[in-house]
Image (spheres, rainbow, N blue to C red):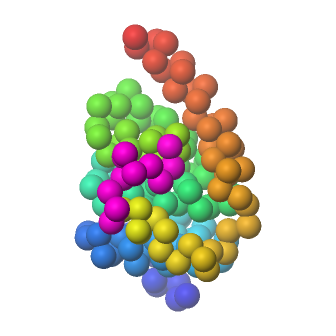
Amino acid sequence: MTDLLKEKLPALLASIQGLYVACACFTIMEAKDRKVVLKSLKENMKEMFTNKMAHLFIIHILSVLDDTTLTKKKIITELLKCLDEMINEKFYQNIFMGIFTPRSKAVFSTEELDCFNAFADKTTSKKSDGQRRLELLKMTLKPMEAFFEEHL
């Protein structure tokens, strides 16, 4: 996959069709290419948390990226920094729902689930979905508990 495509993947996130292509590409990318995509998101990460399409791509990244240390450093840390200011934003909340109840038909539309599952049979991910989810839960549950204890 060309470097230009990897860096411009977020530009596809203007429509559900673009989201499908972005998710499919990310699913089949090698680990080093996925890191390039994450690096290209750095500047816009906070905006992506509340964007109708972009937040879905964040959810997809969380659900397929094996390197959960990188995930914590590049996404989870930024996500948790915004808790106080964005907790009432629906799309921001959906990112947590993607971790807590991945691929839930009660949370995500059929079209969104189709995007998440695009090319799933050709994934380069090695870690099981369950193991990845447990690691993500370990990163997010304690800070979320602390936040709600403090604000309730």
Q: Is residue 122 visible?
A: yes
Q: Position of residue 18 (x, y in %)?
A: 32, 75
Q: Residue at x 55, y 54 (%)?
A: 62
Q: How many marks?
A: 0
Highlighted magenta segment, given as a residue range: 101-111
Q: Position of residue 147 (x, y in %)?
A: 48, 20
Q: Position of residue 78 (x, y in %)?
A: 49, 43
Magenta-colored segment: predominant secondary structure? loop
Vertical order, 75 against 120 (above or below):
above
Q: Position of residue 31 (x, y in %)?
A: 67, 71
| Quadrant (top left/top right/bottom left/bottom right) for the C terminus | top left
| Quadrant (top left/top right/bottom left/bottom right) for the N terminus | bottom right
Vertical order, 36 against 87 (above or below):
below
Magenta region includes residue 110? yes
Q: Residue at x 52, y 73 (%)?
A: 26
Q: Is residue 78 visible?
A: no
Q: Residue at x 53, y 78 (%)?
A: 119
Vertical order, 130 against 8 (above or below):
above
- Furthest-bottom residue in view? 2
Magenta region includes residue 13? no
Q: Residue at x 56, y 27 (%)?
A: 143
Q: Nearer the viewer, residue 59 or 147?
A: 59
